[in-house]
Image (cartoon, grey):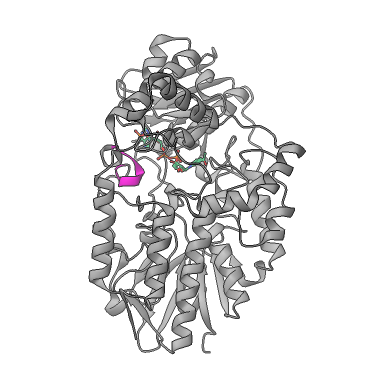
Amino acid sequence: MTTHEHDLIVVGAGFAGLYTVIHAARAGLDVLGLEAGDDVGGTWYWNRYPGARCDVESIDYSYSFDDDLQREWRWSERYATQPEILDYLSHVADRFDARPHYRFGERVVSAAWDEPAQLWRVRTDSGLTACARWLIMASGGLSAPQLPDIPGRDSFAGEVLQTSAWPDRAVDLAGRRVAIIGTGSSGVQAIPLLAEAAAELVVYQRSANYSVPAFNRPIDDEEWAHAQDDLAHRRELSWNGPAGSPWTSHPVPYAEADEAEREAVFEESWTRGGVLFAKAFAQLTVDPVINDAARVFFERKLAEKVDDAGIRALLTPRDHAVGTKRICTDSGYYETYNRDHVSLVDLRSEPIAEVAPAGIRTTARMRAHDVIVYATGFDAMTGALTAIDIRGRDGRSLREDWSGFPSTYLGVALPGFPNLLVLNGPGTPSVLSNMALSSEQQGAFALRLVAYCRGTGFTSVEARADAAAEWTAHGLELADRTLFGAAPSWYTGANIDGKARGFLPYIGGFKTYIDHCEAVADADYAGFVMG
Ligand code: N01
């Protein structure tokens, strides 16, 4: 039996995959979507931990492609919770009839380019096989969870939970002694709610992070009406801004502002909430003087929140400049440490020696737990792709190519891998920008390229190696001018043992990146080879 030949296979049903499937179908393509989860949602399908919400405002973190959609979907809070975002994506899937194109519960395990047939042949973990001329990977930048390799990890007799694979059921923590490992965005969001529910919470922290309160609130009707009136303007600012959101830095450079103005600017950007604090002044993540002023401001705020000086010292970030690891966006995080039943273990002074059946043993002592929560992050930006055996021209392996630093053209195309397009991959602004708009831009760019090839009769397209090398070097060079490279973050691969180091996302700005993409497309895809 011959396998049905699709025009396009899209892997993933998060923001990027869903957008691409909807628009491919609208363009008349025969599109197959493959998704490991049992439904749409991507990151919002898996990360169901208590407290999970987006750190980009809901009104911005939503699709812009359909005006009726963006006006009819009424967000209830400034920062949407995971269930609300999942409902939204489910609504989008129904509204634009995306689900019939998808096969859910299908995790792609291999994809190989068949040169004579000019097709990608894809296989999933259930044994499903499919083929298409085009393969678009919308498999997510933070979708390959990593669990630490701690001796005895699997010997724990209690319940093990993971923020990135939280069960889709109520988890009753009442009366239980809970441990959590990891204090990145996921841990910081979960900790106040875990403390609320548990009899005892022990937080195992390796590195302190900067966290800024979300100042979350319900959106009342008056605010919603105002936001609607301002929506077109807000979207315009977002599309033309450096990070895909309407917020920009204070117009006066730090050096030209006096002390009172600096204080007012830090205070205002603090109360904007969360990650926006890093935008207080332009150059905050470039100039150590500005960054240090932000650090001093932060430490003053921290002192107002945490009563115990010893705990406060442990919660003070020491290993990176403000904003060079993603600032966490919290609701009551630091205040949680004032509660009697919450304690903090500093893994720098007492590392974990082993997980035992009864709990966690550090080099200093044993602590008994009923539940261990892992909030230990992801093999970011490359992990979802290297988990799949992807073979390009002449059997070339993506996994082997990416055992070094990944070379991509515009973050989307890889030399040696014809007709494979990666959305929000290394070399795109993606995780440094609003992922909703970034996903639209990426999906649209990929589909425009597909349409171009179909219109001109080309059956394959591939990035030139020199174009990819140049783009990748350009991205690294831009990052080198900032303070980001010195931080041991997932942006640089530093959180994964043995991973090639280098700044993975494109840091030149969202709008600048879009301009690069447009210029390439307008120049008949300069830097690509068509065949
Ligand atoms: O992951 P992380 P995350 N022993 O990598 C620790 C987005 N996001 O899931 O810093 C002990 O940031 C690790 O310690 P260290 C957002 O972009 C957004 O929290 O490596 N600890 C760190 O504390 C975010 O940046 C939202 O020393 C270990 C933690 O685990 C990204 O996702 C919400 C360890 C991992 O932190 C990732 O966030 C959630 C070990 N062996 C996520 N290994 C919002 O929108 C790791 N750790 C708000």
Q: Nearer the viewer, residue 50 or 450?
A: 450
Q: Is residue 371 above or below residue 86?
A: above
Q: Nearer the viewer, residue 396 or 491?
A: 491
Provide the residue span drawn in magenta.
487-494
Task: Please say whether residue 322 is visible from this viewpoint.
Answer: yes
- Left or right, 332 with reference to 428: right
Q: Could you tell me residue 222's position as x and y percent?
A: 75, 37
Q: Is residue 355 above or below residue 394?
A: above
Quarter containing the C terminus = bottom left
Q: Could you tell me residue 133's position as x and y percent?
A: 46, 81
Q: Could you tell me residue 432's position as x and y percent?
A: 42, 47
- What residue is at 68 percent from the left and 60 percent from the top? 67
Q: Main secondary structure of the magenta part?
A: loop
- What residue is at 41 percent from the left and 38 percent from the top? 326
Task: Please say whether residue 131 is visible from this viewpoint.
Answer: no
Report how many numbered discs are placed on residues in the image. Answer: 0
Does 153 lie within the magenta span?
no
Q: Could you tell me residue 412's position as x and y percent?
A: 39, 65
- Left or right, 68 with reference to 311: right
Q: Residue furthest right?
A: 221
Does 491 lie within the magenta span?
yes
Q: Quadrant of residue 170?
A: top right
| Quadrant field for ligand 1 | top left
